[in-house]
Amino acid sequence: MSGNGGKPGQSSQDPSFKDQSFDDRLRAARLRQGLDKPDAAQAAGDKSGLGVGLTAGVELVAAEAVAVAIGYGLDRWLHTMPLFLIVFVILGFAAGILNVWRRFPPAGTGGSG
Amino acid sequence: MVGGVTFKMEPLEQFVLRPALGPIGQSVNFTQSNLYMVIGGALVLALLVYGTRSRAIVPGRWQSLAEMLYQFTFSMTVDQIGNEGRKFFPFIFTLFAFVLMGNLMGLVPFSFTYTSHIAVTGALALFVICLATAVGLMEHGLHFFSYFVPKGAPAALLPLIVVIEVISYLSRPVSLSMRLFANMMAGHMILVVFASFAVGLAGLGAVGALGGFVPFAINIPLIGFELLVACLQAYVFAILTCIYLHDAVHLH
């Protein structure tokens, strides 16, 4: 109504701005009521407490298993028995934490850091 | 054991592979797992062929099911990978339908769940990760290896970070296969454990028979929960495949 007589830029901006704010408010309200799940939750698929725990655990164990396999293989190959195993156990734990961080980014971060 | 009833609880017995199709299957090691894979593939094919045969504008039940499966997988692929993902759609659809059918068929009594073996899920995950790596190399050439170097990382830390990134990348097929296999196997084991409680208690006279209803009652919601897990894990497997292919196509 107010946009009809105004400048073309204004009239096209006004309703979209109103729509957006309404959509935002609706989304926030639905989120508050638990009707919508957050976007990240939908992308991750399984967001129940048990699901998060299992997924995070599997990610940690998988990275550790790969790292131990690499370390053990390098030691067998180079005859330096405990050296690479020890190094890769630590690196594998770091990789596991990285995996968990990427799957479930803490709120407020981009998630890729 | 009590009252002369011999009762054994073997929750792992259901995962033992046995030759199927008689002596021919035995001679080529064709197990019931392979048989159920063939049945699963045939069921998916049958659903799609039978469901779309009438090509009705207003779809019937089977056509709705076939179209929903198609539409769901298609939108998931395009949402996750982007428009370039269209060429991977047949692969994702096959993978999703195969895993979903395996998980769901496993819930039919006396059937076998082929996704409860890590040999199967591991082979699927290896195939996914090899495809994603090959796509990354084909799309970006040697530039693909910049995937292992995060933006803005200090040069002094690079030797450490690159190794960690490579481990993280290599752990993908492990976690992908382990998640599906562990979920399916654990669910089916729990079902058998509670079912054997019910059977075992039923052998203990009147009180035991009454008590046997408790584990039996637990198994009813558990079956529903397993139905959810079966669909969810197939979905998670497919969507993680999409995410890995997205990373290969777009590099971060």
Image (cartoon, rainbow, N blue to C red):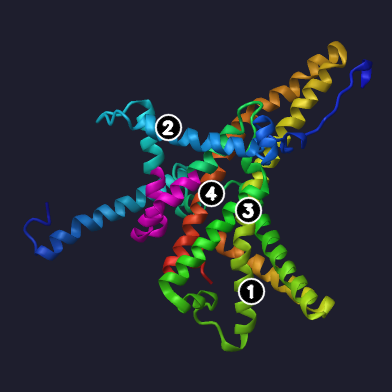
**Image position of B215 with respect to B100: above or below:** above
User: Do the residues bearing badges 4 and 3 touch, measured as CB atoms within 8 Å?
Assistant: no
Q: Position of residue B185 (x, y in %)?
A: 69, 41
B113 with respect to B81 (left or right): right
Which badge, 4 or 3, comes first in the chain's sequence?
A: 3
In front of the other: B82 or A112: B82
Pointer 3 residue: B122
User: Do the residues bearing badges 2 and 4 touch, measured as CB atoms within 8 Å?
Assistant: no
Q: Position of residue A63 (x, y in %)?
A: 67, 64
Please tell me whether residue B191 belongs to the stretch shown in magenta. no
Q: Is residue B252 visible?
A: no
Q: Chain of mark 1?
A: B
* Disc 4 from disc 3: Cα separation: 15 Å
* Amino acid type of the residue tagged 2 in the rendering: Leu
Task: Tell me which segment is drawn in magenta.
Answer: B72-96
Q: Is residue B46 visible?
A: yes
* SS at circle 2: helix
Q: Residues within 10 Å of mark 4 (few under 14, many from 20)?
A: many
* Disc 1 from disc 4: Cα separation: 24 Å
Which badge, 2 or 4, comes first in the chain's sequence?
A: 2
Which badge, 3 or 1, comes first in the chain's sequence?
A: 3
Our reading of the magenta stretch's main secondary structure is helix
Q: What label sits on residue B164 in the rendered view? A: 1
* Disc 1 from disc 2: Cα separation: 44 Å
The quarter holding residue B191 reads: top right
**Are the residues flagged by discs 3 and 2 from a single subunit?**
yes
Which badge, 3 or 2, comes first in the chain's sequence?
A: 2
* Disc 2 from disc 4: Cα separation: 22 Å
